[in-house]
């Protein structure tokens, strides 16, 4: 029936809204794919992380670069790296992705911790202390997936895509947030047989006449720092056995090759069993600490928050690695 009114042949408004929303989500997928490739320096790793095919990741990144009219990644047969433009874009993209994740979290019923949590930690502390803690955390938070990497190097959390790192010792100035978890004594020690054959050092200076077992993971393996009455003393040591592994150093000490100095969380079992004897306890250096560090974010992800809280509770109080071997008064 003719009405005399003009006919509106445009699609309904909700169709435009739906199309705009689809475009936004497609662009978000592109940005997420790009960030995952940048974090893992690999299209294959990004695909595994996102749960899609490598071809899909490549397509999303290529589409993003075409839309921007700029190359964000340098690609070779062996590596993927950021261009200067890509590096600047990634910084802004992370903020967008964090805001989107926070937005989704804000409308969930309980904002329960979920998603992939990538963690880095030193090898010795990881094997000795974190392995059981990680499994307990996984039981407590079944919706959080864990990727745990043990390496005796300082990883770049942002560039390498880690959520949290466990670090031991004095932290360098950075924009990372750090939470102190536990103190650690550095213990000089040797086997009873070695001490019977070579004598017990009474002061740090006496170490000059002893064979040291050097840990190459320390800042300067040839200089051991001690402290007494607030004063710092340095002892220059020497030795023919040098390992980039705390367990190997302690094994060598137990077998009588010399004096080792390692964190108590690695040495405590041998000390309790009498396989190693603590030395120079009156000259104990300043305590170092275990920290959890994570990048600053306007909206801290629930998975990061509960993990750091879990570790803080796990290691609260005097740590078990300081019990059962310290001489009286220490």
Image (cartoon, rainbow, N blue to C red):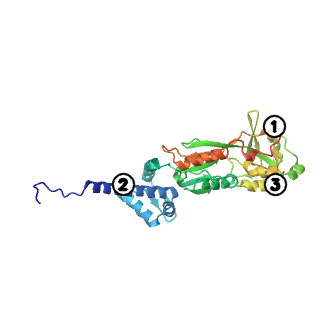
Residue at 18%, 56% in the rendered image: 8
Q: Looking at the rendered structure, which numbered label has been put on residue 254?
A: 3
Q: Determine whether the residue tagged by mark 3 lies in a helix, strand or loop.
A: helix
Mark 2 sits on what residue? Answer: 24
Direction from residue 127 to residue 39 in the image, left or right: left
Q: CA distance from mark 1 to mark 3?
A: 25 Å
Q: Quadrant of residue 252?
A: bottom right
Sequence order check: which comes first, mark 2 or mark 1?
2
Q: Determine whether the residue tagged by mark 1 lies in a helix, strand or loop.
A: loop
User: Is residue 222 in sight in this rendering?
Assistant: no
Mark 1 sits on what residue? Answer: 329
Residue 232: x, y in percent?
A: 73, 36
Local packing at callout 1 (Cα closer than 10 Å; few below 14, some 14-19, many 20+) is few
Quadrant where the image shows the N terminus: bottom left
Q: CA distance from mark 2 to mark 1?
A: 65 Å
Sequence order check: which comes first, mark 1 or mark 3?
3
Local packing at callout 3 (Cα closer than 10 Å; few below 14, some 14-19, many 20+) is many
């Amino acid at each position: 029936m003719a009405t005399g009114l003009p006919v509106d042949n445009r699609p309904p408004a909700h169709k435009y809204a739906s199309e705009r929303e689809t475009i936004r989500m497609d662009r978000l997928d592109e940005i997420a794919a790009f960030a995952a490739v940048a974090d893992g320096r690999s299209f294959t790793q990004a695909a595994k992380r996102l749960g899609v095919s490598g071809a899909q990741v490549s397509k999303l990144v290529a589409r993003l670069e075409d839309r921007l009219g700029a190359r964000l990644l340098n690609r070779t047969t062996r590596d993927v790296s950021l261009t200067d433009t890509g590096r600047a874009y990634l910084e802004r993209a992370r903020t967008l992705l964090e805001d989107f994740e926070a937005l989704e979290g804000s409308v969930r019923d309980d904002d329960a911790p979920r998603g992939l949590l990538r963690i880095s930690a030193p090898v010795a502390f990881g094997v000795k202390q974190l392995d059981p803690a990680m499994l307990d955390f996984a039981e407590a938070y079944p919706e959080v997936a864990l990727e745990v990497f043990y390496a005796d190097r300082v990883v770049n959390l942002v560039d390498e895509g880690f959520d949290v790192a466990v670090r031991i010792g004095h932290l360098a100035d950075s924009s990372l947030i750090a939470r102190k978890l536990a103190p650690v004594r550095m213990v000089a020690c040797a086997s009873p047989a070695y001490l019977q054959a070579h004598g017990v050092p009474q002061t740090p200076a006496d170490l000059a006449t002893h064979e040291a077992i050097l840990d190459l993971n320390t800042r300067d393996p040839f200089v051991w720092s001690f402290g007494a009455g607030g004063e710092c003393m340095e002892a220059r040591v020497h030795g023919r056995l040098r390992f980039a592994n705390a367990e190997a150093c302690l094994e060598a000490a137990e077998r009588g090759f010399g004096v080792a100095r390692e964190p108590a969380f690695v040495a405590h079992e041998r000390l309790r069993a009498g396989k190693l004897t603590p030395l120079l306890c009156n000259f104990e250096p300043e305590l170092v600490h275990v920290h959890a560090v994570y990048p600053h974010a306007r909206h801290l992800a629930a998975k990061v928050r509960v993990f750091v809280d879990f570790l803080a509770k796990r290691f609260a109080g005097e740590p078990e690695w300081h019990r059962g071997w310290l001489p009286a008064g220490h």
